[in-house]
């Protein structure tokens, strides 16, 4: 999306219909736009695995790295792999894009799901992407196998099918 498309007011308006709010209410906490709005660049951020607004990873920066490739921009330059400062702007593929961060990997090091994303968290994040009206979804799930345990004949597979049809119907890439 362009950097003016998602304002804090627009997030507040759409928040009432998100799975993120539903999950926080189930924990007995109320979620507001102040909780999920980081900046004009990142107007929505929620951790579906841990049901909180803290999307900063504790053990893997894979999603952060991918987000930087997509929408990163820094006028002050960057450091190369050897630590040398390159004094020219860093620009991602779409530097003017806004990023809606929907984290689906847990930070709980004792969680048996550590290192993988639960299907229910992925589905909730995808549904919120439709609710929020994003233009593009990148599922940086870290596996070349995709959904290796979901069968289209089970309830979970049917739910994914419905969600993906809604994504397609909304014209989301």
Image (cartoon, rainbow, N blue to C red):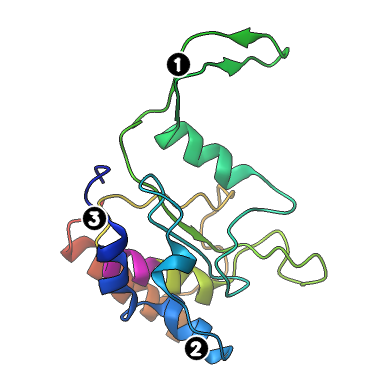
100 drawn magenta: no
Neighbour class for label 3 at 10 Å: few (<14), some, many (≥20)? some
Report the residue at 57% width, 37% height from top.
65
State the image coordinates of residue 29 (x, y, percent, origin top left): 55, 85
Q: Which numbered mark, 3 or 2, is in the foreground of this view?
A: 2
Would you identify the image quadrant in which residue 133 lies?
A: bottom left
Question: Which of the marked residues, 2 or 1, is nearer the chain's N terminus?
Answer: 2
Find residue 89 and name its label: 1
State the image coordinates of residue 134 (x, y, percent, origin top left): 28, 56
Query: Mainly helix, strand or loop, the magenta region?
Result: helix
Q: Look at the picture and state if 90 lies above or below 32.
A: above
State the image coordinates of residue 54 (x, y, percent, origin top left): 60, 62
User: Where are the magenta residues, as a range?
Assistant: 126-132
Report the residue at 45% width, 16% height from top.
89
Neighbour class for label 2 at 10 Å: few (<14), some, many (≥20)? few
Q: Which residue is mark 3?
A: 172
CB atoms of marks 2 and 1 within 8 Å: no
Q: Which residue is mark 2?
A: 25
Is residue 37 shown to the viewer in this render?
yes
Question: How far, Cα to Cα, is label 3 from label 2?
Answer: 28 Å
């Amino acid at each position: 999306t362009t950097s003016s498309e998602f304002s804090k007011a627009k997030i507040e308006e759409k928040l009432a219909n998100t799975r993120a709010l539903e999950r926080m209410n189930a924990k007995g906490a109320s979620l507001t736009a102040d909780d999920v709005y980081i900046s004009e660049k990142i107007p929505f951020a929620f951790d579906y695995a841990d049901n909180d607004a803290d999307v900063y990873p504790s053990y893997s920066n894979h999603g952060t790295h991918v987000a930087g490739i997509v929408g990163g921009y820094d006028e002050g330059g960057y450091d190369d792999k050897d630590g040398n400062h390159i004094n020219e702007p860093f620009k991602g593929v779409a530097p003017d894009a806004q990023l809606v961060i929907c984290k689906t990997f847990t930070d709980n090091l004792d969680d048996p799901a550590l290192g993988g994303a639960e299907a229910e968290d992925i589905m909730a994040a995808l549904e919120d992407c439709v609710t929020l009206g994003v233009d593009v979804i990148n599922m940086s799930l870290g596996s070349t196998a995709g959904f290796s345990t979901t069968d289209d004949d089970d309830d979970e597979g049917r739910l994914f099918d419905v969600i993906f049809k809604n994504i397609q119907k909304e014209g989301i890439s």
